[in-house]
Amino acid sequence: MNEVVPTICRLCIAHCGVLAHVEDDHGRRKVTKVTGDPDNPMFKGYTCPKGRALPELHNHSGRLLHSLKRQAGGQHGPISNAKAAGEVAAKLQAIIDQYGPRSVAMYVGTPNVGYPAAASVGNSFLRALDSRMFFTSNTIDQPGKQVAMAAHGKWLGGEPDFEHADAWLLMGANPIISKSAGIPGQNPAQKLKEGLARGLQLIVIDPRKSDTARKASIHLQARPGEDHVLLAAMLKVIIDEALYDHEFVASNVAGFEELCEALAPFTLAYAADRADVPAAQIEEAARVFANATCRHANSGTGPSFSMYCNLKEYLLMCLNSLCGAYTREGEQVTRPNAMLPAYTPRAQALAPFKGWGYGEQLRVRGLTDTAAGMPTAALADEILLEGEGQVRALLCIGGNPMAAWPDQRKTQRALQQLDLLLTFDVEMSATARLADYVIACKQTLETPGMSQSAENIKYFGTGIGFQAAYAQYSGRIADPPHDSDLVEEWEFLYDVAKHMGHELTFAAFFGFAQYVEAPLEVMPLSLDDKPSTEDIYERICANSRIPLEEVKQYPHGHIFPGELKVAPKESGCEARLDVANPFMLQQLEEVAGQDYRAEQHTPDYPFRYIPRRHNNFMNSAGRSIPRLNGGQPWNPAWVHPADIAELGLQEGDMVRIASEHDAIPAVLEADDTLRRGLVAIAHAFGGLVEEDDRYQELGSNTGRLIQTDKDYDPITGMPRMGNIPVSITAW
Ligand code: SF4
C-alpha cells in the first residue's frame, strides 16, 4: 500500500489542501511525505514549510505515545487513557464537592482550530460541571477585534474581495507569513503579486519592513504602539478633506459628529511626531485609501500586543465605515458559506451589541466575560488568589500556558499550585512537565478533518477565510504509531463526563452567535451510545449549505457553484454602525491627553520589545523538528545591526533582555528590516523558569517580560505584551 491521498493540513487556519504520501508500515498507514495538491481548486498546489513537515510531526521520536500520570516522586509514569479518565473524574468530583464548580477551569489554545470537536465538546463538558471558567488564547491574541465589533456593529454584506481591490491597508499584519488578515491565505505572496500587477496600492503600518511591508506602496514604519494615533490622523484627513462616503455615512453610520470632535487633537503634525513618520506619508495613505474604489483595512496580531487593542480595532472599523469599504447591494459576496448554513447577506448594519460587563465576574481587576471570551491573562491570578471561587483544577486543550501566557513566572507558580492540572498534548511541553495528567493525543492526519473551521473564522473579524464557496473533507489517512494509546480530546472528556454521570451537548457553531443567521443548534451527545468523531462532524454540518455527503464527493476540495449577491436592506431596518461608542471615545481622549514623549523616553530601558512570527513555526509548534528549525531551535532576538554595533555586541552573542518586570536570555541576530531601537522576538518559546541555561534548546520566553497587573486593557485584561521597554546587555 503506497498511495498519495488528498487531505487537509490543519496546523493553521489556512487549512491548505495537500497530498499525503502514505506507506504501509507493518499494517499501519504511515505518512512519509506531504506536498501541495495541484488539483485542489483553492490552493492549487500551495503549501508552506510547516505543512510539508507534517510527516516529521507525526513520526518524530519525541512524540507521546501513551498518557502519563505524575507519580508520588514527581516523575511521570504511563497510564492507560481508560484508567486516567476514571481517576480524573473522581478527582474533579472531589474538587467540585469541596470547592464548587467554579474551581474547575478550562483553557483552549490555538491548535484546537484543527480539531472542530475539541473546543465545542470541551465547553460543553465545563458547562455540564456548571462552571463558566472557560478561557481561550483569543484574549491574549486579538481580542480587540470582537470587542470593537460589539461596540461598532458589523456590516452584514461583508468585506470586498481583495482580488478586485485597488487599495488595501494592513495594520501590524504580515499575511505572507501568518496567512491571516486581508490577503487571502491561499498562497498570499502570489495573491499580493497579482494584486500589485493590476495596480493595487498596498498601505502597511508596521515598525518592521516585513515580507509584506516590503511590497507596500506606502509603508508607515512607525514607532510600535502608535497605530491608533496614525488611524486617528488618517480619519481626520478623510473627514477634513470630505473624502468619506457621504451617502454611506448618512444612511448607515451613527455618531459621525461626535467622532469628528474626538479626532480634533490628532493633527498630522501631532501623529507624525508621536509615531515618527512623515506627516505627508500619513496624509497620502489617507487619500489613497479614501479615493480608491474598492478597498478595505485589516489588522494582524501585533497591534493588539501593544495596548489599546480595542481602540485600534475600533478606529480601523471606523475607517472602513466612513469610506463605505464594504460589499454593497447587488455586489457579489466575497465569502459565501459552504459548510456553514445558507444565509442572506444584506446591505445593512448589524447593530452594536453588549461586548463586555456580563457573565462570569473575575475576582481580579474588575474583569468579566466579553465578546472575545474570558480574560486569560487573569487566569493565573484566579488560581493563586485564595478564597471562595479559587480555581483548583485546570484542563488545557491544545495549549501550552507555560509558553503562551503572559508573566511566565506567575504562570508557573499558579500551575504548580493547582490540585489538578491536566493537559492534552502530543509531546512533553513545558506545561505537560508540570501536569498531573498528560493525555497523549492523536495527530491531525490520524483524525478526520474538514474546512469548516477555516470558513467560520470570518465571523471573528479577522478578514480571512475562503474567497469562494469552497469546502473539503478528509477522512483519517494515517494510523497512530504501533503500540500507542492515543485519544482525541473530546473523546477523553466524553469518557470523564460519563464517569461523572453528566450528559454532554455540543453546539454546531462555537462563539459569535450574534451574527450567524441560522440559530445556534445545541445537540445532545448520548452517554449510552458513544459517537465517533465522524458522527460529530456529520452533526456539526447538519445545516450546512452544501451537505457533508456532497463535500465528500470531492476529495481534492471543491468550489461549489451558486453566486451569492448582497440583498437590499430590509425595510424598516434602523441599525447603524456606531463610530462614537462612549468607551472608545473616552479612550481616544485619554490617548490625546498622554505625555507621549515621557512615555517614549525610557533611558533605563532604551529598546522596545515587539513580537514576531517565524515562517517555519506555528507559534512554537515544530521548533524541535530539525527540518523546520534548521539546526536552530531557539528564537533569536532580532535587532538592527547598527544597534548591535552601538551596544558593542556581535551577532550570535548571548544577551540579557530585561524589562522592568523580569529578564530572559536570548541570542542576538541582526535584522536591518527593523526600526532602530527595537528588539523582535517570536513569542511562545521557552522551557520552565529555572531552565534559562537551556535557551539554545528551548528558546527564550517573552512572556517573562510581561506584567499582567500594571498596564492592561480594562475590558479583556490583555496586558502590554508588545512595545515593552527593555534593555539589552551582555549575559
Ligand atoms: S499555511 Fe497553514 S495550513 Fe497551509 S500548509 Fe502551512 S501550516 Fe499548513
Image (cartoon, rainbow, N blue to C red):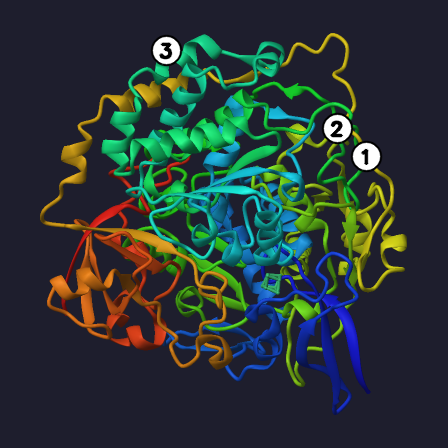
Whether label 2 touches label 1, CB < 8 Å: yes
Mark 3 = which residue?
261
Of helix, strand and loop, which one carries label 2? Answer: loop
- SS assignment at label 3: helix
What's under tag 1, amino acid-wise?
Leu
Q: What distance separates the C-alpha of mark 3 from that of mark 2?
A: 33 Å
Q: Earlier in the sequence, mark 1 or mark 3?
A: 3
- On the rendering, which quadrant does ligand 1 occupy? bottom right
Label 3 or label 2, whichever lies nearer to me, is 3
- Secondary structure at numbered mark 1: loop
Front-lying residue, 545 or 288: 288
Q: 330 and 618: which one is in front?
A: 330
Decide which of tag 2 and tag 1 comes sooner along the chain. Answer: 2
Q: Is residue 562 above or below residue 525?
A: above
Q: Position of residue 284 (x, y in %)?
A: 41, 32
Question: Disc 2 or disc 1, which is closer to the eye?
Answer: 1
Q: Say what amino acid the circle numbered 2 marks.
A: Pro
Could you classify mark 3 by the number of other residues whose Cα lies within 10 Å: few (under 14), some (14-19), or many (20 or more)? Answer: few
First in sequence: mark 3 or mark 2?
Answer: 3
Residue beneath disc 1: 564
Please indicate whether residue 370 sits to the left or right of residue 549 in the image: left
